[in-house]
Every structure is written in structure tokens, then in C-alpha cells.
Image (spheres, rainbow, N blue to C red):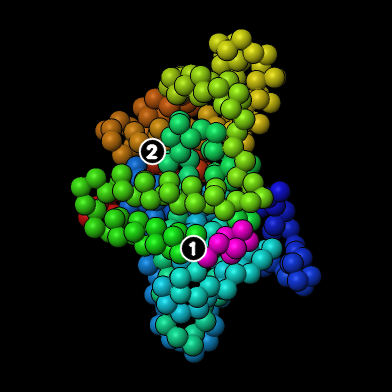
Amino acid sequence: MKTDIRDMIAGVYERKDNNKMAVNLTAYDNEQVDYADPNFRMKIWTIRHPIQASIQYGPWHYHEEVEWITVLKGTMTIETTQQTYTLQAGDVVMLGSNELHRSHKYVQSQLIYIVCHVDMSAFLDPSLLTYQAAFTGRSANLTRLNDALRKYPLSIQLIHELLNQMLREITVKGRGYEFAVNASLKKLLYTLIQIDDEQIIEPMDHQLAVKLRPALAYIEQLLESPCQITDISSKLNYNSSYFAKLFKKGMGMTFTSYVQMRRMKRAEQLLLTETCSVTEISGKVGFTSPAQFYQLFRRHFGCSPRQFVERRNLQKM
């Protein structure tokens, strides 16, 4: 089961080699990923490190996004609180949502590698609802897939090629590149399912998915107004307590957390596509109090709504 971040930063952890490792509480950071296109929530880029005099230790950090790293040249180490992965050219490592980690860069040679951050909830359409809790890290520790991946060199090679392909598509931005990148990402996820011998990626039960699909549709319709679990459960003829447990089991998060996440997604879209004021947008995503909207937005994105828009406008210049 995935270790909670609050537990991770509490002190000392035991690695698989039984050695103790202390986590520096002042060094970790909840990283906010800035997307070039906020409506296409993937960030993939190349990092280059020249030969230097000493080993570089990156800070401990984590983020909601799932992350892939693949090395093009040189050697590096990715370290979590549970395991260490040494990567050379062609190797791949996957880090699940909110996985506390840091990197070591070896300096004997130049280091070049690709980093890919993906907001999985933005890429899993309703047809893939059964996999949402697993691939967003709500019900599975995706970092554990690295052990399975090491058994399948051809799958590592394929994922390495897919990451390179997505980087090329996003860099060139040819007409319809979003479809190509989306297809490559889905192929990558399918590859992970194929090598998942321990069934870490556990899809939602089909009958449960059938029960939740209309609930999710209702939530989308009610984002502009107060959306209570009692309203949704009554529409579906469920007891509210039973429905709350059903929802959390299927989605890997509480009803309230899911509604807040969807409202923030909608607010993000409106801020970038409408000329409404922040107060007007807060009303359009179901908040009667602009102050409450402002507080939740800052907690979700790490900045105010106005700062969010200003940053995106600067990126377009």
C-alpha cells in the first residue's frame, strides 16, 4: 500500500537493504508543474548536465503528476524512500503520484535525460473510468511497477521510444499533435498493464463503474451550483452513507474531494477562455463565497487565480 506523504516526512525509513535513511524535513517540496498548454496537461522536456567536479544531489520533492524519466546519455540515480534506481542510457523509471523522490547526477560523463510529467486525470476519458483510481495513484502505488518492468527489457525499450516520440510531437507541435501524444501515452499505459504480473493496476469492478458513471455525469451538470452528496445519491436512489462508501471505493477519493477537483479543472478552463472576473468564475463553479474559491484555488494550484492567468500569458509571449 502506498505510504502517505505525511508519514514519509515524519522521520526515518527502512530501505530494502535494511539500511536506515533520514529524510531532511527542510528539503522536500510539493512541486507545482507549469504546463505550456494548461488544457493539455503533460510536460515533457530534456535536461542536460555537463561534466562537473562532484555528484549533484537534487532536493526531495513530490507532485500529484505521475512522472517518467528515461536516460539518453550518462548515468543517474533516482531515489525514493523505499528504493534506489540506477539508470543508464535507455533505462526508464516511473514515479507514482505524490511519490517522495530525489535524483543523483553522476559527473564522470555528460548526463542527458527526458522527464515527463502527466496529470493522469486529464487523460483518462470516461471510457477508461475503471482505471482512474489506479493510474491517478488513488488505489495503487505505481512506483512498484519498476520492479516488474525490470523483468521485461523489451517493454523498457518500448517505453523509452514512446517517451522520445511524445517529446518530438510536443516540440514540433504539428497539426493534430495532441492526438499523436495521447495515443502514445495510452500505448505506454497499456504496456504497463501487460507487464503487471502482480496486478498492481487493479481496475474498478465493472458493476461498480456502471453505478458510478451516471453519478459522474450528474456532478458535471451540477458544477455551477451547490453539489451535495445527498442530491446525487437521491437521484440514483441510494442511501447517502452507502453511496459515499461506494464512491470512495470506486474513485479512490471522497465525493467532496472529487467535486472540488472537478470545480478547479472547470475554473482553470474558464480563467483561460473567458473574460469573466474571478468573482464571476467562482460563481460559475459553484462557490457562493469568492473567498472560499480563492483559498481552494491557491491550495490546488499554488497561486492566486490572477497569478495563474498572468503566468500563462507570459508563457505565450
Residue 151, placed above or below residue 133: below
Q: Amino acid at mark 2?
A: Glu
Residue at horizontal 60%, vertical 23%? 207
Q: Position of residue 177 (x, y in %)?
A: 27, 49
- Residue 176: x, y in percent? 24, 45
| Quarter of the image that includes the C terminus | bottom left
Residue under numbered circle 1: 154
Choose between 104 and 204: the one closer to the eye: 204
Local crowd size for mark 2, using a 10 Å CA cut-off: few (<14), some (14–19), many (≥20): some
Q: Position of residue 125 (x, y in %)?
A: 43, 34
Q: Is residue 226 above or below residue 184?
A: above
Residue 268: image tag = 2
Please identify the quarter of the rendering in which residue 79 is found. bottom right
Chain part drawn in magenta: 146-154
From the image, give the main secondary structure of the stretch colored magenta.
helix
Total marks placed: 2
Residue most toward the right?
Answer: 18
Residue drawn where x is 79% and y is 70% of the image: 18
Local secondary structure at mark 2: helix
Q: Nearer the viewer, residue 73 or 267?
A: 73
Query: Which numbered disc, 2 or 1, marks the residue that appears first in the sequence?
Result: 1
Q: Say which amino acid is labelled 1.
A: Leu
Tell me if 222 is positioned left or right of 8 in this view.
left
Residue 90 part of the magenta segment: no
Determine the secondary structure under disc 1: helix
